Amino acid sequence: MAKTVSTTTLANMKKEGEKITMVTGYDYPFARLLDESGIDTILVGDSVGVVVAGYKDTLPVTVDEMIYHGRAVVCGTERALVIIDLPFMSYQVSIEDAKFQAGRIMKETGAGAVKLEGGVTMRETIKALVDIGIPVCGHIGLTPQAVNQLGGFKVQREKERLLEDARAVAEAGAFAVVIECVPTDIATEISQSLTIPTIGIGAGVGCDGQVLVLHDMLSLFDRFRPSFVKQYADLGQETKKALENYSREVKQGIFPGAEHSFK
């Protein structure tokens, strides 16, 4: 069995120039597939609210929902590092709230780390979590929990602010940072300036790793598809075909056959 991935593993991968793979996961079956496929890190993202629960954005997702999905993913994982998103308003109110909710998520799921959004404004919160032994992955650029403030899902181009946010996250003790929807040249400069790994999503090839939402890359979610997503399979259509065949066989009396019945 391959060696278990840890935050130290990711740091060493950056030093050695080895790219890091991250994919979102929300349940046991897909967690097993991700783990067995050699994916380095599984992110239990609050994107679960959109691609699984059907919410219009990530804001309604609760800590209880993240714990439920996080526990299922951990059950299906033996090697990959599992990181769980802190949902909206679970860490923004106060540092004490952040410590309690992050600690609860770690304790009740068995995950290896949490992720939160924000740069400079979250410096003290990240430091407080790291100080009590909770590994933190940062997230800068387009931060979906702030979509209403940002005026929609837009590419973030303010270079100095992005650099400042990245430095703040790293200095606070985060072990890695996700960079979302940022021009390639800016994301590359950030990656080269930090000692911690950067994980890009819509941020170009210059990042130390990449992350995609599972349901986007497998075409299991069709409400919208970000331009930075590459579709690696069309499981949506394949699943639909299987269900149509099942329905047809039941209605025509083909299924169940003798081999699916007891005597």
Image (cartoon, grey):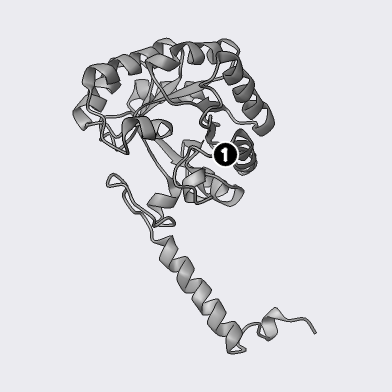
Residue 37 higher or lower than 253, as above or below: above
Asked if residue 165 is positioned above or below residue 31 in the image, the reply reads above
Res 20 seen here? no
Q: Nearer the viewer, residue 251 or 53?
A: 53
Q: Number of labelled discs? A: 1
Q: Is residue 103 above or below residue 109?
A: above
Q: Secondary structure under badge 1? A: loop
Which residue position holds label 1?
A: 1
Mark 1 residue type: Met
Measuring from the top left, give residue 213's x and y in whole percent: 42, 44
Residue at 44% in and 41% down: 23
Q: Is residue 163 above or below residue 228?
A: above
Other residues around mark 1 within 10 Å, as few (<14) / some (14–19) / many (≥20): few
**Which residue ends up furthest to the left in the rendered image?**
185
Q: Looking at the picture, how far across and down is residue 137, in whole percent? A: 46, 24
Front-most of residues 238 and 6: 238
Which is more toward the observer, 82 or 87?
A: 87
**In the foreground, 260 or 119:** 119
Q: Quadrant of the N terminus?
A: top right
The picture places residue 187, in percent across and down from the top left corner, at 26, 27
Residue 115 pos. (x, y %): 49, 27
Rendering quarter of residue 237: bottom left
Q: Residue at x 36, y 20 (%)?
A: 15
Residue 246 found in image quarter: bottom right
Residue 232: which quarter of the image? bottom left
Q: Can residue 75 be seen in this view?
A: yes
Residue found at the far right of this picture:
263
